[in-house]
Amino acid sequence: MSAVLRLLTRTSLITQIVIGLVSGILLAVLAPSVATSLTLLGSLFVTALKAVAPILVFVLVIASIANHQPGQQTHIRPILWLYLFGTFSAAALAVAASMQFPSTLVLDTARIDMSPPGGIGEVLQGLVLSAVENPVKALAEANFIGILTWALGLGALLRKAGKATRGLTEDLATAVTDLVRVVIRFAPLGIFGLVASTLAQAGLQALLGYLHLLAVLIGCMLAIALVINPLIVFCMIRRNPYPLVLMCLRESGITAFFTRSSAANIPVNLALSEKLGLHEDTYSVSIPLGATINMAGAAITITVLTLAAVHTLGIAVDLPTALLLSVVASICACGASGVAGGSLLLIPLACGLFGIPSEVAMQVVAVGFIIGVVQDSAETALNSSTDVLFTAAACEAMERRSA
């Protein structure tokens, strides 16, 4: 047992995750009945991450603001602009790819009982109301907009508190951070269970009929991750962006791919930001904010699936309408929840631009759930890894300018 523990301590976490990934795939192929029984293992890991993330964000933001020294710079504004520009770029690319490689669907899926939002106004209203949510309810429901609002307010007021009180917030943040590190150490086992059970239950058979649609979706996400994002980062830091891009994809994207939840991946991103030596005052706010509004993958999903329905129904799309769809998809993406499948229920809103009835739009949502085992995983990996990427790029760019 001691030899095993020594081996684990010498092996990096990413290597352990890759071992868990490969082991899960092999088990799903060789013994699917055994792999199916590992659902609990993966669920425990994801649930633990989701449980600790709201508390971590709450205490980190309070401690960062309360102990912030006058004159110490943060870089939230440029990060916010990067989030918005990146999301719009993803939607525009998805429009271009969908027009160049149109996908069609067989819209005969059984209706499912869901309640999509009625318009963009409803999405924006929901975001505003989330900011003033009861703090206890916000923590219980992982409402990160509400958590950030209350944490920022309490942190600002606690700046006037005594040194002992502010020190207590710092100690509490340290304790919760250490607890998160313990949870993250179980990532290899959690991913092993997630991969094994998901592949054993869903398999690849359900995806074969949607290969073209998946190719467009995944192709757009890869183009954003490996071409557009590096270009944006290069404009910020003026050096080769790929070492930073690949590190974020490796250390944040892999975990996010299997948890399929931007909210659950917040602790992983905070740990990576600390590893990169970023300003805690900055990343403690930008990372949870990114899990809410930095949704390039969601913008791609909404755009591609909407245009797939448009092409299936033979609706003509002109350039002004395509640009409007990019804007609408970007706004919708910012309102998507940071949980698995959070972007799919916003597809009917985008379909409404083309007069597609809700009954048909909900069939498109059902298609999204069928391919979700790949689509939602790739979407979350792109969203979550970009949170750290843009935060790191903005911090480095501001430091270079002030040097």
Image (cartoon, grey):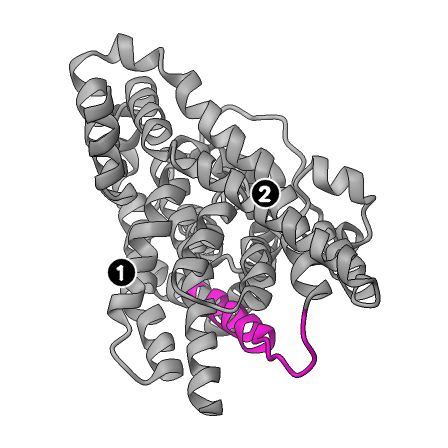
Name the one closer to the observer, 164 or 392.
164
| Left or right placement of residue 138 versus residue 204 in this view | right
| Left or right placement of residue 14 versus residue 61 in this view | left
Q: Is residue 224 above or below residue 182?
A: below
Crowdedness of circle 1 by 10 Å Cα count: few (<14), some, many (20+)?
A: some
Residue 324, by quadrant, is bottom right
Locate residue 111, reporting x and y percent. Answer: 56, 26
CA separation in Å, label 2 and label 1: 28 Å
Locate residue 172, reporting x and y percent. Answer: 65, 47
- Do labels 2 and 1 touch, CB within 8 Å? no
Residue at point 48%, 83% (across, down): 398
- Amino acid type at mark 1: Leu
2 or 1: tag closer to the N-terminus: 2
Locate residue 281, reporting x and y percent. Answer: 59, 67
Q: Mark 2 points at which residue?
A: 176
Name the one closer to the observer, 166 or 187.
166
Using the rendered image of the protein, determine whether residue 355 is visible from the camera's viewpoint. Answer: no
- Amino acid type at mark 2: Val
Q: Is residue 73 magenta?
A: yes
Which secondary structure, mark 1? Answer: helix
Q: Is residue 47 above or below residue 92?
A: above
Name the one closer to the observer, 121 or 54.
54
Q: Main secondary structure of the magenta part?
A: helix
Residue 372, by quadrant, is top left
Crowdedness of circle 2 by 10 Å Cα count: few (<14), some, many (20+)?
A: some
Q: What range of the chain is rendered magenta?
A: 68-90
Which marked residue is nearer to the observer: mark 2 or mark 1?
2
Q: Residue 40 carries which label?
A: none
Which secondary structure, mark 2? Answer: helix
Residue at point 79%, 45% (across, down): 135
Q: Residue 246 carries which label?
A: 1
